[in-house]
Amino acid sequence: MMKKIVLILFFAYVGIGFSQEEEKSEKSSIALVQDSNAYPNPFKDKTNISFNVSKIEEVTVSVQNILGKVVFFKKILAEQGRNNLIFYKNNLSEGIYIYTIVIKDSKISKRLVIK
């Protein structure tokens, strides 16, 4: 009886170990966007939007005005590591905007100020 309990516990432990390894490998295959900032911010003519991605992936960068209207949209192929995108004010008026960077599994939004 004791041997059966030990065997059941052993196989349960081994099964848990395998499922944890599978979770780790699934997490490492997920693309993440992080550590995003824009500088200078506030800005007059242009700003540099920079961000890190965990692997090579298609990224969308959009800018919305305070009413939620998309005023800029661009798809780029981001390299693993640090990426930079120059954003030009063009005909946008002074005010607060929100930029959003999206990869399949990850999204980050931050504020931009045009002065």
Image (cartoon, helix red, strand yellow):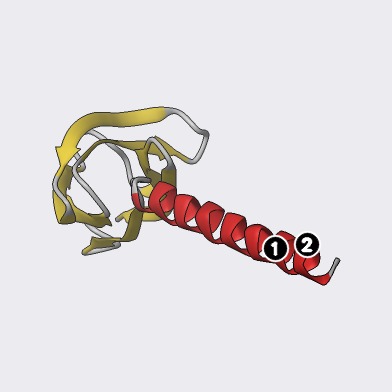
Residue 1, position as x, y percentages in the image: 86, 66
Crowd band around label 1 with a 10 angstrom C-alpha radius: few (<14), some (14–19), many (20+): few
Tag 2 secondary structure: helix
The residue to which callout 2 is attached is: 4
**Is there any visible trace of residue 97 in the rendered image?**
no
Residue 7 spot, x, y in % from top left: 70, 63
Q: Which mark is drawn over residue 26? A: none
Say what secondary structure mark 1 lies in.
helix
Q: Amino acid at mark 1?
A: Leu
Asked whether the beta carbons under mark 2 and mark 1 sit within 8 Å of each other, the answer is yes
The picture quadrant where one finds residue 44 is bottom left
Compared to 109, does 8 lie above or below?
A: below
Towards the viewer: 7 or 81: 7
The residue depicted at 32 percent of the width and 40 percent of the height is 93
Distance, label 2 to label 1, CA atoms, is 5 Å
Determine which residue is flagged by label 1: 7
34, above or below 95, in the image? below
Q: Position of residue 94 (x, y in %)?
A: 34, 47
Give percent across and percent down for residue 99: 36, 45
Q: Is residue 94 visible?
A: yes
Of the pair 19 and 48, the residue shown nearer to us:
19
Q: Is residue 96 left or right of residue 16?
A: left
The 10 Å Cα crowd at callout 2, few under 14, some 14 to 19, many 20 or more, is few
Write the residue at 60% across / 54% down. Answer: 15
Question: Would residue 71 be found to the left or right of residue 13 on screen?
Answer: left
Which image quadrant: the C terminus?
bottom left
